[in-house]
Amino acid sequence: MRLSRRALLAATTAAASLTSAPPASAARHKKRTGFENLAASGYERLQGQRVGIVTNPTGVTRDVHHIVDVMHADERVDLGAVFGPEHGFRGTAQAGGSEGRYDDPATGLPVHDTYLKSGQALADIFTASAVDTVVFDIQDVGARFYTYIWTLYDCMEAARLAGKRFVVLDRPNPVTGRHAQGPVLHREFASFVGRQPISQAHGMTVAELARLFNGEFLTTPVALDTVLMTGWRREEFYDAWDLPWVPPSPNMPTPDTALVYAGTCLFEGTNLSEGRGTTRPFELLGAEGLDGRWAAAANELSLPGVHFREAYFAPTFSKFQGRTIGGVQIHVHDRRAYDPVRTGIGLLVSARRVWSGFAWRPDNWIDKLTGSTRVRTMIDAGASTDEVVGGWQDELRAFRRIRKNYLLYG
């Protein structure tokens, strides 16, 4: 797959505007990302290393230059390759797609496709690239099934197999790092939407996750270095930072999307629309035959921090493309009280009760998303929201104890 003409022009124009100096000094900001701290040090941790970067469109500076363009233009960095995940390095591919192997027109750097590659196959790509150090800088959204954290895991494992050093540049968890919430994956349900047993909303940064992966899940640890943020507090949402929001994927347009995603992504495992093809993916949910009864039933649950509005919409792609359907819009009015996973379960329970057409995807994708058969079978048996949520509390407490050992910020 090749970049579009528009993407090529945009990338080339962005690169042409750079000088060899890093843009917008981070020194004046009390809060700094991992990349800002790396650049402020003169890239000290990369000295004497040929570097490859795993990144996507979210790997930007405060003034929205891509870090690949910045580092390529800086003589202090020996940048030799880029590794693109799902949706691609420059972000031209939709869900389930990537950009393939090509030479980046803005920098001339070889771009290697990592999507759906792991183990020795990915290690061979790192070896062929002739880099010494693999750097990771991608914005996460805090949910187990958001696949970039498993790109991180796969790349760490592959770097170990290839004998490469691995450096993670940290960024904020946009929905805070206060709590781990939701069911913990059972290993027999491992997939690219969940490689290892962590909770559905993990409440960690990518650097913290990297330490967890290295300490708990990799059979042999990789040579790991993490460049931490300055000034991040666990209770902060993304808007506490003076940072641009770049959609990490096409259906994650705003931090508001990230806030609900850990719960409403569960609707990918049903025959209802999860809002793809609308301007509010994962905030709009619906199907043909649903009406205001669902919003009324969901509001009766008195879920903390959220109200539901009867809504009608016509997705432009994905489920129910071009057809007007009914459902709900989620309105979070108190994001500190809001629990996205409990909300997702409450919406599943209430949708099944008010709509006779409710069904799970035939492949039981919901089991991959929730990490076991428990949620599906309990809801089918008529369990309440509290009963379903209560079913995972023991395993969640166990994960929280492990997680605590790898947290890096107060």
Image (cartoon, rainbow, N blue to C red):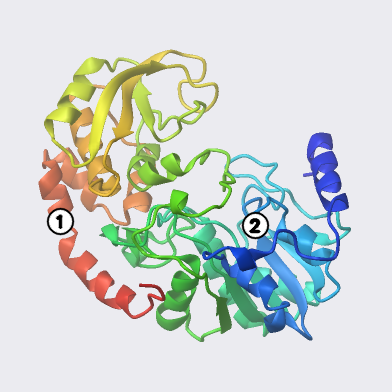
* Badge 1 amino acid: Gly
Q: Is residue 342 above or below residue 330?
A: below
Q: Along the polypeptide, which appears first: circle 1 or circle 2?
A: 2
Q: Position of residue 23 (x, y in %)?
A: 74, 59
In the depicted view, which residue is nearer to us: 100 or 176? Answer: 176
At which x and y percent is residue 62?
64, 55
Residue 103, horizontal then vertical, whole percent: 85, 55
Q: Is residue 49 left or right of residue 269?
A: right
Depth check: 135 or 96 in front?
Answer: 135
Q: Horizontally, is 73 left or right of 92 in the view?
A: right
- CA distance for labels 1 and 2: 38 Å
Which residue is at a point 83% across and 61% down the rendered structure image?
Answer: 110
Q: Secondary structure at mark 1?
A: loop
Few, some or many C-alpha atoms within 10 Å of disc 2 (few <14, some 14-19, many ≥20)? many
Give coordinates of residue 299: x percent, y percent: 17, 29
Q: Quadrant of residue 154?
A: bottom right
Q: Which residue is mark 1?
A: 391
